[in-house]
Structures are given as structure tokens and as C-alpha cells.
Amino acid sequence: MQVADGVRNTRIMCKELRWGPQTLGRCHERFTMPRPSSFNRSFARLIAWLRVLPPLIAALVVASALQGCAVNRQGASASPDVDLRQLKSFYVVRLPADERGINHLIATELGRLGFRTSTGPPEQAPPDADAIVSYEDHWQWDITMYMIELKVFVRAPRTDALLATGTSYHTSLTRKSPGEMVAEVVSNIFSASKAAGGSKS
């Protein structure tokens, strides 16, 4: 009896709201359907999130794949006027923003090749240095920070003329350690200098 009274009262309420015949059924359902509990509302939100997650995950995977595509570039060029192999000493200018010691890595690699090396700020370059070495290092984040590009420049100490330059570029999938990238660039620079000297003769 109470159910019948409730339905009758609902119909009366819908009529009092002056809803049209087309919306009367929906009005009846609105007032007679039980209100969802907080659990049901939370469960509905969870289902909505689960429907959104697959395309969201797919988008993140695609973005990560595009960012992590393997790109390798390396190269060097050198002036034919100077054979770097004939030089004795190099001074590596430290970048003020360098907190990773890339200047020391370059100096160490040049020393391993048999040259006399030192490093520090530009104003402390020794007057007897045969060449001044500068560099640019670029870093990128992909799970961890890594060096994505290194450029090295070799210049004449008195004229600032560019004697040689080399670059190494490796994205995340083929990343190299800073030491490996330094060794790669330095090796390419001396190979380019040798080739340039050979083409001159």
C-alpha cells in the first residue's frame, strides 16, 4: 500500500511541476529510483577512469617512443693549415655552468693521447699553450639525465681562429657516458685533422 501511495504521490509531484507528457516518464523514474550510495558513486568513477586509462597509456607510450627514437650523429672538420698531431699542449677552458667536470674529461682524453694538458677559466690559459679547447654540452631527461650532445672546438690561442670542431649526438636509446662521448669527439677531431693534412699534400 505504501508503494502504491508513493507512486501516486510521485505522479502528482510530476504533474505539479507541469512537466510535459514526454518527460513525465523520466520524472517518475527520477523520483522513484533509489538514490545511489557513496560506494556506487565511487565505483562509477572508478569505471570511468578505467575507460580513460587505456588510451591515456597508449598516448604516453607513443610519446615515449617518439622521444626515444635512436638518433646518432657524429662528425668533425679541421683546417688543413694546422696538423693537430704536431701540437704539444692544449688548454681546456671550463664552462662556468659546468658542474659535471666535462673539462676534466676532455683534458684527460687529450693527455691519454700524449699531449700536455691543463684546464681552468679562460683568463688562466698559459701563454705557451698551442691550442685552446672549448666545448658545449647539452643534457636531457629520460628516466635519468644524460648527455645528448657534445660539441668541442679547437682554436688558435692568439688569433682565435677555428682549427677544428667535432660533435657527438646520441639520443636516449643509444646514449653514451660523458667519457665515451668525449673520447668519440676527440678521436673524430684528430682523424679529421689527419685527413685534412693529407688532402693538402
Image (cartoon, helix red, strand yellow):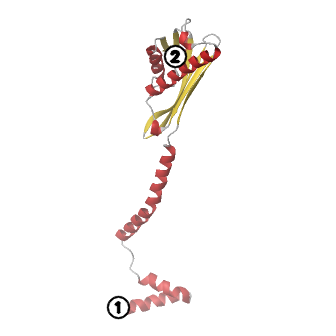
On the question of residue 62 being in view, the answer is yes
Callout 1: SS: helix
Q: Position of residue 58 (x, y in %)?
A: 46, 55
On the image, which quarter does residue 134 sit in? top right
Query: At 45% across and 18% down in the image, what residue appears?
Result: 109
Which-is-in-front pick, marks 1 and 2? 2
Q: Position of residue 119 (x, y in %)?
A: 49, 14
Which of these two is toward me, 79 or 125? 79
On the question of residue 161 being in view, the answer is no
Callout 2: few (<14), some (14-19), or many (20+) C-alpha neighbours within 10 Å? many
Callout 2: SS: strand
Query: At 34% across and 69% down in the image, what residue appears?
Result: 39
Q: Is residue 141 above or below residue 136?
A: below
Q: Amino acid at mark 2?
A: Val
Q: Which residue is mark 1?
A: 2
Q: Position of residue 194 (x, y in %)?
A: 56, 17
Q: Is residue 78 above or below residue 170?
A: above
Q: Which mark is residue 25?
A: none
Quadrant holding the N terminus:
bottom left
Query: At 43% across and 90% down in the image, what residue appears?
Result: 9
Quadrant holding the C terminus:
top right
Q: CA distance from mark 1 to mark 2?
A: 93 Å
Q: Which residue is mark 2?
A: 92
Q: Is tag 1's residue or tag 2's residue first in the polypeptide sequence?
A: 1
Which of these two is toward me, 33 or 96? 96
Query: At 46% across and 15% down in the image, what residue appears?
Result: 113
